[in-house]
Amino acid sequence: MRIALTVNGERREAEVWAGESLLTTLRDRLELPGSKNACEQGECGSCSVIYDGELVCACLVLSAQADGHDVVTVEGLGGHAGLHPVQEAFADTGAVQCGFCTPGFVVAAADLLRRAPSPTDDEIREALSGNLCRCTGYAKILDAVHLAAER
Ligand code: FES
Ligand code: FES
């Protein structure tokens, strides 16, 4: 089936199969590999995107459902202005090691700061509880979110 959706502010079309996930469509058909595929079961958050203004795991959304909807991926977060403050803060604080989890954390953190511009540690932990990182121990990630909030 053919779907049309808005991705990072642009209308995009794709031919998808009935059971295809939005994550697969983004990565394999729309040339947006920023959202990562680590578990494909909604467990790790590496595929986090903003879907009609809500944070979701793209691996759990059927592309067929996404027809006519609005998606923002990590590639579109900063818009034409360049890097999003969260992306800059992750780089500046060393919150990135292997980087596989980073796009999902960045999208989830940006979503949090949109809702809560000055979050507490607990609010950050709660907001990022759906994102798993095997490398950083999370401390630097918390630092990055605080830095982005300050900026
Ligand atoms: S790949 Fe979607 S939650 Fe892990
Ligand atoms: S930086 Fe490697 S999994 Fe998070």
Image: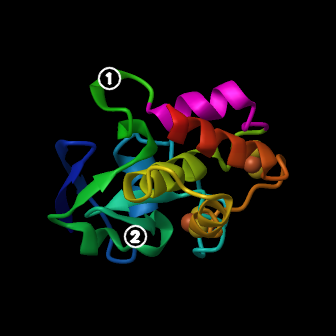
Q: Where is residue 141 in the image (x, y as percent from the top left)?
A: 70, 46
- Magenta residues, start to end: 84-97
- Helix, strand, or loop for circle 2? loop
**Labels 2 and 1: the sequence-earlier one:** 2
User: Quarter of the image holding residue 102?
Assistant: top right
Q: Is residue 51 left or right of residue 117?
A: left
Circle 1 SS class: helix
| Residue 52 in picture, x, y percent from top left | 25, 64
Would residue 96 be counted in the magenta stretch?
A: yes
The image quadrant where one finds ligand 1 is bottom right
The quadrant in which the N terminus is found is: bottom left
Vertical arrangement, residue 13 with respect to residue 40, above or below: above
Give the side of residue 5 with respect to residue 26, left or right.
Answer: left
Q: Main secondary structure of the magenta part?
A: helix
Q: For mark 2, does the 10 Å Cα neighbourhood hold few (<14), some (14 to 19), or many (20 or more) residues?
A: some
Q: Nearer the viewer, mark 2 or mark 1?
A: 1
Query: At 29% across and 62% down in the image, what residue appears?
Result: 53
Instruction: From the top left corner, tell me how far across and down residue 79 is, in percent.
Output: 31, 32
